[in-house]
Image: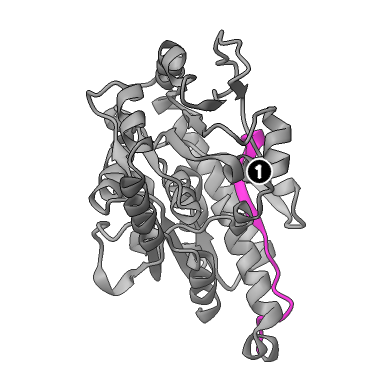
Amino acid sequence: MPNLAIANALKSYCGTNSRANRGPHCGIKLLYVGSRVPLDRELVKATDIPFKSIFAGKLRRYFSWRHFVDPFLVLFGFLQSLIIIIRFWPHVVFAKGGFVCLPVALAAFILRRPIILHESDSVMGLSNRIVSRLARKVCVAFPDVIIQEEKVEFTGNPIRLSIQKGDRQKGYQITGFHPHKPTLLVWGGSQGAQEINEMVERDFPRLKSTFQVIHITGKDKATTIQDEAYVSFDYLGPELKHIYAITDVVVGRAGANSLYELALMQKPNILIPLKSSAHNHQQLNAEYFERMGASIILRDQPLHDILLALWHSPEKQARMKESLASVAKPDAAEHIARLILSL
């Protein structure tokens, strides 16, 4: 979770940097403000960071009956944010996470608390465009994001460096796979997984001749595949680092967090971005990675064919790994932590 990566970087920076220890940053206090979605609280629960939840409406650009409810949720979330900020009185508010940030950022701006915004994707969402006008600094994960130049810092996307510490033996224990055969990791993300799941189910008889397949299906979206060369999970948390350790090739969506994890881990990959216009940022994310030579976008080709072409070309894999290494920003969280402390 990017926000937690930044929190860890703040703690680490203050704990090891002598200038920080001599200044007011020593003994830094953190408060995480998230949505009322249970997953937010669960992810933060594993840390020692206090958590506050607020109501948050969504700024939709399509018709929904929730249009009539969302303004009240945003207003209530704004009032909650005012109370939270007045009580905690932060030196800096770091905003990342889309529509849930809007009421917090509005409250922070009114109370004259400096704001730093992070935009994960290659195109800025509506709520982040509003927050960017209030922010002192806007950190971006993709250099194509256009905004006032004096505000922008190209930081990359903060990710958990702990994913580099996977254990191959544990990965094989989790999956029951064998090290003698290459491993393909497939994920569909929290939205739109069904398309990829159906593709895997259709192509698996051909895929299994070359690969062992680890499939992250999404909640309640299991396939009917029963085979020793296939294992599926609804979701992977801390175990993901062990899965990465045994993965040779990845097929998946083009969310910014996932892409920067692939870059850090230098995993050859094929991307299937969401096609909905509401999720056009995934297409643009994928196009940037493809332009850099770090990914291949699946278009009209059969998945099996493009996978085999990549797998049977060590030279292409090597070039892709070099490109992934050049795109990766392993110091993104530390970079953002330094900006936060500078305010």
Can the viewer see residue 42? no
Q: What is the tally of numbered marks visible in this picture?
A: 1
For the residue carrying disc 1, how many other residues have a C-alpha within 10 Å: few (<14), some (14-19), or many (20+)?
many
Q: Is residue 65 above or below residue 117?
A: above
Tell me which segment is drawn in magenta: 23-40
Which of the two residues, 77 or 227, is positioned nearer the viewer here?
227
> Closest to the observer: 335 or 244?
244
Q: Is residue 235 left or right of residue 137?
A: right
Q: How is the image coloured?
A: one colour
Residue situated furthest front in the rendering: 180
Q: Report the residue that reaches farthest toward the top.
A: 224
Dividing the picture into quarters, in which one does residue 63 lie?
Answer: top left
Q: What residue do we see at 42% from left, 16% from top?
A: 206
Q: Secondary structure at mark 1?
A: helix
Type of secondary structure dominating the magenta stretch: loop
Task: Depth check: give the residue in front, 313 or 30.
Answer: 313
Residue at 61 percent across and 68 percent down: it is 9
Q: Can you give x and y, in whole percent of width and height, for residue 156 in the image?
A: 41, 61
Q: Is residue 153 above or below residue 204?
A: below
> Mark 1: which amino acid?
His
Task: Pinpoint residue 178: horizontal percent, then vertical percent.
Answer: 64, 31
**In this picture, residue 325 sits left or right of residue 2:** left
Could one spot residue 297 in this view of the protein?
yes
Tell me what residue is drawn at x 33 percent, y 37 percent. Answer: 310
Give the labeled residue for mark 1.
242
Q: Is residue 142 left or right of residue 190?
A: left
Q: Is residue 72 above or below residue 318?
A: above
Q: Residue at x 48, y 72 (%)?
A: 335
Residue in front for this viewpoint, 89 or 2: 2
Residue 170 pos. (x, y %): 73, 41
Q: Is residue 33 magenta?
A: yes
